[in-house]
Image: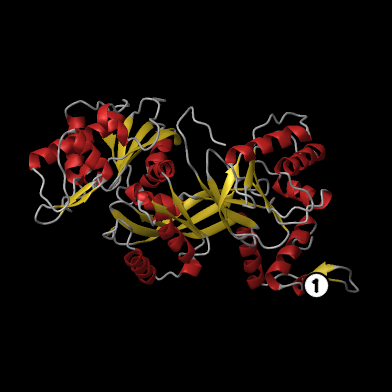
Amino acid sequence: MMPPFSGIGSTFSQVALSAVNGVGAQRHRLHDSEGGDHIHEMSIGEKGAMAEFIWKVDNIRLTTVGIDIGSSTSHLMFARVHLQRKTQMLSSQFVVIAREIIWRSPILLTPFLADNTIDAGRLRSFIDEAYRESGLVPAAIDSGAVILTGEAIKRSNALAIAELFAADSGKFVCASAGHHLECMLAANGSGAVALSRATSQTILHVDIGGGTTKLALIRNGEVLGTCAIAVGGRLIARDDRGCLTRIDEAARSMAQAQRIDLRLGEQVDEGELARLVEALSNAVIALIQQKTVEGPARELYLTPPMPNLARPDVISFSGGVSEYIYRREARLFGDIAKALAENISRAFFDGRIDVPFVDPGQGIRATVIGASQFTVQVSGRTIHIAGGKLLPVHNVPVLSPVFQMGEHFSVDDVADAVHAALSRAHVIEGQPIALAIKWRGDPHYARLRNLAEGILLGLGIDAGASRALILIVDGDVGKTLGNIIEHDLHYQHKIVSIDGIQLRAFDYVDIGEVIQPSNAVPVVIKSLLFSAGQQNL
């Protein structure tokens, strides 16, 4: 009878036992005797420990947080995400196979001060209370995002607020903002992307928040384009006496175009207010009809218009206004959200919009669900990290050099492409950057060596340079590429070379600390997905 874990299996079991029980475990299980080399049967506890170790090599569970600070409301959500290595033992890429929401906060009306800044103190208290009620502590959070959305982005202390919460909410929580990113988060967090994938339908998803409306056109689970406009349910707010307490710039400009005078602290004529809400509603309706917004409402665009890439089969909604569209909410909060929802709903019933609408599953919490569950990718197994501690890193600009990676390419080809990308980006001297490399073809040494030399030449760095080098490769060559740069080209400073990351259009990247024993790192790409025809670096 063959001993258990013989041959190749015995080698792997020794490594696993060494990691589980310490170096001495290997000598304890495999040793010499008069009867020759033999292996003792493992105990039940040791078998369980080794099985757990093996599982963790190809599986990662992260506790994530999403914090949404919006024009109208703020809230957060904790979730658990299970990632598994794609094609185990053959690929470095991890994919999400399960997500679970573990706690949701109450919804807070976003606090603003009289000077038009966000009330950091009230938000800080709200976040602290959320952690206490959830039973979680910041140290338990692996990944996530703070998202400032809609009009909140424009507040003078928005960046400081985002950085405050990012720093305090866990070891790998990033601060993000941007209309295209928010479109993506809402489309994913609402369930629209999953619905499109499951039904093979083309869905136009419309997220209507407090200050902005974000649209994403989705086909077979893939977002084709995004667009945002400054229309939301809390552009205008009134107190119990009907006096105006909030007039956002978009509402003021549209009111002026219709010769409606809005003044803080004063009441507004109900007929004039209805006329203003109708004009704002018509801008959203035009976008749903896949028409270009015209007239004064054209100034409401926050992004370039989205081209008509495909006709939708259905429309889906999320955001606070969607709660009225789907009749999950009837209360009034002194704003125009319900009136906006009624006008948009009426366009479906009177035939102006001739496409049906469906409920994707999530409404007001869509963005925060997207922030907590859909921002992270993981790279592992074939990564290379050298030169001392560099991770985690946050808000690193990513450059995408473009060159033809045929069977043969030269060092100069790579260097020219890298230099061109660097020149377009206007990177500050000494600022960390990450290069996104699209690898094609076989991983022969000569090709990887040319790539490595070209990268260093294009960046203008050599073995004596001090810049940290961060490489993100879509193919499974990160470890080999990093080894060549460190050992063959004698680059003596910090190197992070990761792979298996799927990149589209993007702006910045965060890379977290190494997760053991999978030897993986979590990566957040803060995507800015542009409409067709626009180019990224």
Q: Residue at x 54, y 35 (%)?
A: 536
Residue sitting nearer the eye, 118 or 108: 118
Question: How far across and down, in percent of the image, does residue 519 sit?
Answer: 65, 58
Question: How far across and down, in percent of the image, does residue 210 sit?
Answer: 27, 48
Question: How far across and down, in percent of the image, does residue 385 sit?
Answer: 70, 56
Q: Is residue 436 visible?
A: yes
Left or right of residue 112: residue 443: right
Q: Image height check: is 416 above or below 142?
A: above
| Residues packed near mark 1 inside 10 Å, few (<14), some (14 to 19) or many (20 plus) | few
Question: How far across and down, in percent of the image, does residue 25 sit?
Answer: 75, 72
Residue sitting nearer the eye, 339 or 189: 339
- Which amino acid type is shown beneath numbered disc 1? Arg
Quadrant assignment for the N terminus: bottom right
What residue sits right under mark 1 in the picture?
Answer: 27
> Residue 349 falls in which quadrant of the image?
top left
Q: Residue at x 59, y 44 (%)?
A: 398
Left or right of residue 216: residue 273: left
Residue sitting nearer the eye, 380 or 195: 380
The color scheme shown is: secondary structure
Quadrant assignment for the C terminus: top right
Q: Could you say whether the residue bearing mark 1 is in a helix, strand or loop?
A: helix
Q: Residue at x 21, y 51 (%)?
A: 246
